[in-house]
Image: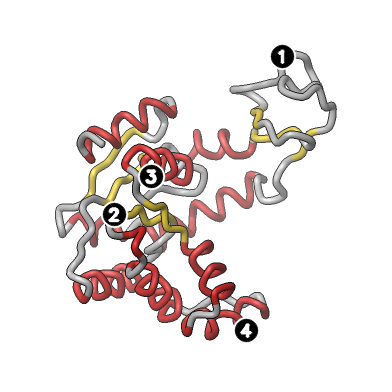
Amino acid sequence: MGPPGAGKGTQAQRIADAYNIVQLSTGEMLRSAVAEGTEVGKKAKPIMERGDLVPDEIVVGIIDERFGSPDCANGFILDGFPRNTAQAEALDSVLEKRNMELDHVVELQVDDEALVERITGRFTCANCGEGYHDKFKRPQKPGVCDRCGHRKFTRRDDDTEATVRSRLEVYHRETAPLLAYYGAQSKVKSVDGMAEMDEVTRQIQAILGAP
C-alpha cells in the first residue's frame, strides 16, 4: 500500500522475482480474463469496452478465479487491490473460502510534498524510455539521452501538480482507511518509502523473511 508514485509496482515486481511468487495487478487480471473468455471475463468485457468502471463484484470474481491458478499456489502479491474497505471485506471472504490469508500488508510511507516533487519532475526519453527527473536525475548532457543519444523527451499528461494532488486526496480519503482495517488484524508493516529503492526492498524483505 501507498499513494500514487510511492513505488508500489517497482517493489512488487522485485519481491515477486526474489520470492518466486506472482504479482497480481487487477488491470492485468481483468484484461486476461476478457482475453481468455472466462465467465467473469465475459461480464467485464462490455463494461470495459464502454470505458466504465468495472463493479467490485466482478473484480472480486476475477480475483477469486485467479487465486485458483497453479502459479498462485506458492503465494502472490496484490498490486492495486483492495482500494477501499468494502473491497477488503470482499477479499477476506474470498480468501476464507479458499482457506488462504494475507500474511502482511506492507505500507510504503512517503511525504506528500516530496511525492509531488518526485512525480511532477519525471520525464522519459521518447525513443528508448529511459527515465529522468528535473532534480534527481538529469541527462549528463542537457537535452540528450544518456542511453541512446535521442534528443526528444516526453512527460505523462497526468504528472501535473494538480492531477497528482487530486490523486493523493483520493488515496487519503478512500484507500488510507484500509490501514486501520488491516491494522485491526495486526497485518500492517510500514517501511520508509522515501529511502533509496534498494533500501526499500531490503526493508520489505526484512518483514517477509529470507526468500
Res. 197 image quadrant:
top left
Compute the Cα span from label 3 to label 4. Answer: 31 Å
In front: label 3 or label 4 = 3
Front-lying residue, 132 or 115 = 132
Q: Which mark is residue 94?
A: none
In front: label 2 or label 4 = 2
Query: What residue occupies the far top of the structure in this picture?
Result: 140
Discs 3, 1 touching: Cβ within 8 Å: no
Q: Which residue is mark 4?
A: 46
Q: Position of residue 160 (x, y in %)?
A: 67, 45
Amino acid type of the residue tagged 4 in the rendering: Pro
Secondary element at tag 4 = helix
Secondary element at tag 3 = helix
Q: Position of residue 194 (x, y in %)?
A: 42, 31
Q: Which residue is mark 1?
A: 140
Amino acid type of the residue tagged 1 in the rendering: Gln
Discs 2, 1 touching: Cβ within 8 Å: no
Secondary element at tag 2 = loop
Q: Residue at x 38, y 74 (%)?
A: 65
Type of colouring = secondary structure
Query: What residue occupies the far front of the structure in this picture?
Result: 70
Compute the Cα span from label 4 to label 1. Answer: 48 Å
Compute the Cα span from label 2 to label 4. Answer: 31 Å
Q: Which residue is mark 3?
A: 16
